[in-house]
Amino acid sequence: MSVIIVGAGPTGLMLAGDLAEAGADVTLLEKRAEESNLTRAFALHARTLELFDMRGIADEIVDQGFEVSGVRVDLGGGETALDLDHPESRFKYVLTVAQARTETLLQRRAEDLGVRIRRGAEVVGLEQDGDGVTLSVRTRDGAHTERASYVVGADGAHSVVRRLLGVGFSGRSYDTHIILADVRPDQELPPAINPYMGADGVALLPPYGDGWFRAIVWDRSRQDVPLDHPVSLDELNDSLRRITGGRISVAEMSWSTRFLSERRQADRYRVGRVLLAGDAAHVHSPMGAMGMNTGIQDAANLAWKLAAQERGRAPTWLLDTYEGERHPVGRQALRVTDFVQRMAVAPAPVRAIRAHVVPRLLRVRRFTAAMRRLISGLGVRYDRPREVEDSPSVGRRVDDLPLVRAGEPTRLYELVDPTRFTLLDTTAQGSAAEAAQPWEDRVLSVRVRGDLPEGADVLLVRPDGHVAWSGEHPAPGQVRQVLAEWTGAP
């Protein structure tokens, strides 16, 4: 199987590594001639870290980041807090880390697995037929064509692949020019995500560690400054002084830019043999830091389906579930970030009551739990495909269950194979694992001891860590039927 991925950002790199691990021949085309050292995306949420954990790379990036377990909201007249502690995850925090470090980690994994990365390669044309996709590519050495079984556009908000497909990008731009900067404040700030909401705008200050913070600033009086106008330290300090009431000033600034935030989503994620992922499929406000995380989770959902499709190890409907599952997740991310953005840059009538409404909302446990799970990705659940057997918990994310295998303690995420289904069999006889042996090329069968969800004693886990099926004392014939429904004939 050959796949060309357009765009070497976090989404494209994650997808490339997963496909290569599944045995695909993967080429990554990137328009930029040089590797990026930008730090625009600054946070990894719990579900993204869990996906990294399943690939054995989470601990390395955690060592490079800063663990943040709360949001401390300053509304000008007092403070209130949102707890980001995730009791259901090993990663009970938001990890703030420069995007460049995340990309470096994912790139090294992809290259170690054999992915070819070609920089300075701009896609200018696309044609597809029943057997594959042909791309017209322009480099400094001239133009040429490349062909693959499938193409994935992970080439950002201004995606050329999406434009060449003629797919709409529905939504709008916010009327807000936002400043991003990496700064060292004069004051000592709490080790939390620190939003300041004032009459003149909003400033968000999450920590990186070593005294450095990311500043995300919307200044009502500076929202029309051209995007290409440099950000000066004096300008940033003036905005912070007015927004925070003089409580925050910056001693040092290492990087800065302006950008126009948008709220848009691709009308379709798949057209034939071409698919869209990451910012090519959805863009939204940086409030909530969900963009990069949603894209990486797109990649984890798509890779195993694409690999199974090309190998002939998947039912005909499986690849269509990528759009069916991830388009609603992208839409939900737009809604959540839009809500946070509107509260932050609220008009005068809303600002007048914001200091009273926000603290009350954050004291409602059901509301804060729902927001925490939505933003972190831990609450994502997929609908059961009509073509497969129903069972308890189907489509839910699986916790990192403590298990015992061959007398040794382990946990689920150490066992999950991101290229294959994982069948956990806790029955005394091991009959489910035995029934799954004809599918061993696409199902990892493991006999373990431990408690499975919903009282089940057999659990089938998708390669992206969601429940495919669970059963209690299932007959071997039922196990074989479920595996055939999800993965095809043995």
Image (spheres, grey):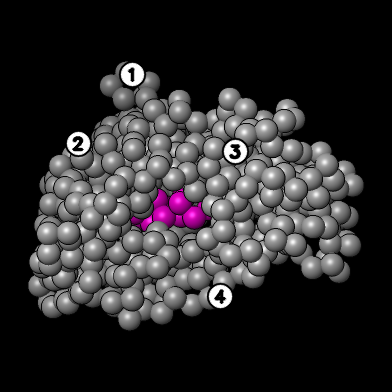
Amino acid identity at mark 2: Asp
Q: CA distance from mark 4 to mark 3?
A: 31 Å
Label 4 or label 1, whichever comes before in sequence order: 4
Q: Nearer the viewer, mark 4 or mark 1?
A: 4
Residue wearing tag 3: 253
User: Are circles 4 and 1 on residues that touch, CB within 8 Å?
Assistant: no
Residue 441 within the segment the image draws in magenta: no
Where residue 93 sits: x, y (%)?
58, 36
Residue drawn at (42%, 32%) of the image: 61
Q: Is residue 130 visible?
A: yes
Label 3 or label 2, whichever comes before in sequence order: 2
Q: Nearer the viewer, mark 1 or mark 2?
A: 2
User: Are circles 1 and 3 on residues that touch, CB within 8 Å?
Assistant: no
Position of residue 179 in the picture relative to residue 418 (left or right): right
- Residue 408 has which mark? 1
Majority secondary structure of magenta residues: helix
Residue wearing tag 4: 172
Amino acid identity at mark 1: Glu
Between 82 and 398, the residue placed more toward the observer is: 82
Query: 10 Å neighbourhood of mark 4: few (<14), some, or many (≥20)?
Result: few
